[in-house]
Image (cartoon, grey):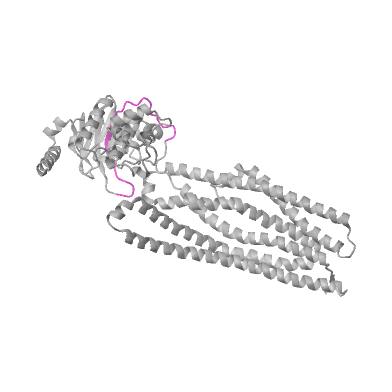
Amino acid sequence: MLFEKHINKYYLKYWFFFAIGIIALIAVDVAQTFIPRFLGKIVDDNNQLVVDLEELGTIIGWIMLCAVIMFIGRCIWRLTIFRASTNIAAHIRREMFEKAERLSATYYHETKVGNIMNWFTSDIEEISDFFGWGTVMIIDAVFLSASVLISMFSLNLWMSLLAIIPIALIVVWGALVDKIMTEKWELRQSEFDKLYDFSQENFSGIRVIKSFVKQNKEIHTFAKIARRNQEVNVNFVRLHVIFDVTIEIILLLEMAFLLGFGGWFVYASVTLNPIVIFGQEVHLTIGELIEFVGYIDLIIWPMIALGQIVSMRSRAKGSLRRIGAFLDTPEDIVNPVNGNRLENCRGEIEFRDFSFAYPGYDARKVKNVSLVIKPGEHVGVVGKIGSGKTTLSNSLLRLYNVEKGSIFIDGVDIMDCDIPSLRDAIAYAPQDNFLFSDKVENNIAFATENVDHEKVVEAAKFADVHDNIVGFTKGYETVSGERGVTLSGGQKQRISIARAFYKDAPILIMDDCVSAVDVKTEETILHNIKEARAGKTTLLVASRVSSVRQMDRIIVMHSGNLVAFGSHDELMQTCPLYQRMVYLQELEKEVEGGAR
């Protein structure tokens, strides 16, 4: 069996199913061993011209009873053991999913999606198979083998001793191969991770590949990865086949060996010249030989199962090691014990000498920022690309750990806040405008369990996307496709804004969410923010000054530093950088107007 801290608890949870299944399996194993005995008795008792029909009927009745026990027992162990293995796989997958949700963004920057998907599919299936068929094979290998060996030794000592030799060879062979197969399985899964990840990345970036006419290049790269995957798989399968074939050869040689010696013992007994071994005469009848052949036929399966267990356990052990490493991954973002819940949040935000560097990088993206955003204030954030605008706004969501005492919401340090309540108080429209492959209505109402259609329409009108949606063939029932592939960039952006507005949170963060819309639509959205978000804190990150000039105050960032913080009029008088940004963007408009 497999014993590891992440699965030991499931033995206790499903002990009843395993117990009932194992009892039924043992009953089937024991019932099977009686059939060769009955067949041998039929041959020995009826090898004359006179047939005792009454005794023959009794023996056939016992055989039928064994068949009924085997049928019922097999139904029971399939229903219990396989149910337990399926449930265990579901529990492990759920535990992994919950772990995946708790891991920070840093982990996903360092770990490829293909690896994770392979753990959730192939590796869990291997563990499920081991709990299911592996349990059956182990019980058969132990109890059916034991039951058959006991019957064999009670029938004929010397024939049984001859039968033990291949069993010992199989056990030794399995022990030698186990470690090698585990290593080769882990290598196979690792190569499959690469294949899975490359495929996923290409499907996601298919537009880019086609637009740059790089299909052939990607096909050749895929072929190299696939060939390496093929080599590793063939090596693993080759070892697996060699292992199985070796066991088959041993078992067939055993059968031929025993039939030869058994026939010799029967012939010697019939001719009244019994063979003497170590001073003991060996007697064997035709019925006993048939009975012994029946036992040999029965023991072939547990011997094959013993070989398959080695291979299956090696695969499951390798998969469990990978899953265990994932579940043991340290969690960067940990909810504080007895954290302060943000209830009735007013929306006050304070940065106190806030600095931040992304994990794994020494350079700070934000440096010594100190400012206070009042409750209900509408604040714009502008600056060049890489100036720290997104880092400043995203830090409020605590997607990364920040220095304690550097960010406060309503006077509470976010490092001491209950994370679910913190994120519940903030609505977020991200820069990448991610949409789920679902109905447009469900995408907008993502923040709640129950969809309020009227509120969805209100949110769509806020983002000035309602007219576009009703123009779709199915309206709000339209499926957006994976990552919103069926929608234009502006439509995705506005639906993302509508989703954030629908949440109706005390704090709204819009990260460069109006860059893909025209000026008129932008003006409509900005007007709606001023009207619909009155009295609620709103942060609008933008690249264009025109997007934030109507905000109550504006944060100007440059190279991670806070350059200025004030209204548009104040900044036009006091901040040269802001003045230059305004001048350059107005000049750009004039040039574009002249070009027309």
Please say if 95 is above or below 569.
below
In the rendering, at what x and y percent does residue 173 appear? Answer: 61, 66
Is residue 360 a member of the stretch shown in magenta? Answer: yes
At horizontal 74% and vertical 57% (from top left) the residue drawn is 147
Say whether residue 411 is visible: no
Instruction: Check the image and name the residue furthest to the left.
Output: 594
Is residue 73 a member of the stretch shown in magenta? Answer: no
Please say if 449 is above or below 271.
above
The reply, left or right, for residue 84 in relation to residue 380 is right
In the rendering, at what x and y percent does residue 283 appear? Answer: 84, 69
Query: Foreground: 570 or 475?
Result: 475
- Magenta: main secondary structure equals loop
Query: Foreground: 266 or 389?
Result: 266
The reply, left or right, for residue 125 in relation to residue 291 is left
Say whether residue 281 is visible: yes
At horizontal 54% and vertical 53% (from top left) the residue drawn is 126
At horizontal 72% and vertical 66% (from top left) the residue drawn is 163
In the rendering, at what x and y percent does residue 459 appear? Answer: 32, 30
Residue 435 position by quadrant:
top left
At horizontal 70% and vertical 55% (from top left) the residue drawn is 143
Residue 258 position by quadrant:
bottom right
Residue 339 position by quadrant:
top left
In the rendering, at what x and y percent does residue 17 appear? Answer: 64, 44
Query: Foreground: 188 or 203?
Result: 203
Q: Which region of the structure is painted magenta?
A: 336-361
Query: Foreground: 291 or 94?
Result: 291
Instruction: Check the image and name the residue furthest to the right.
Output: 50
The reply, left or right, for residue 116 in relation to residue 57 is left
Q: Quadrant of the C terminus?
A: top left
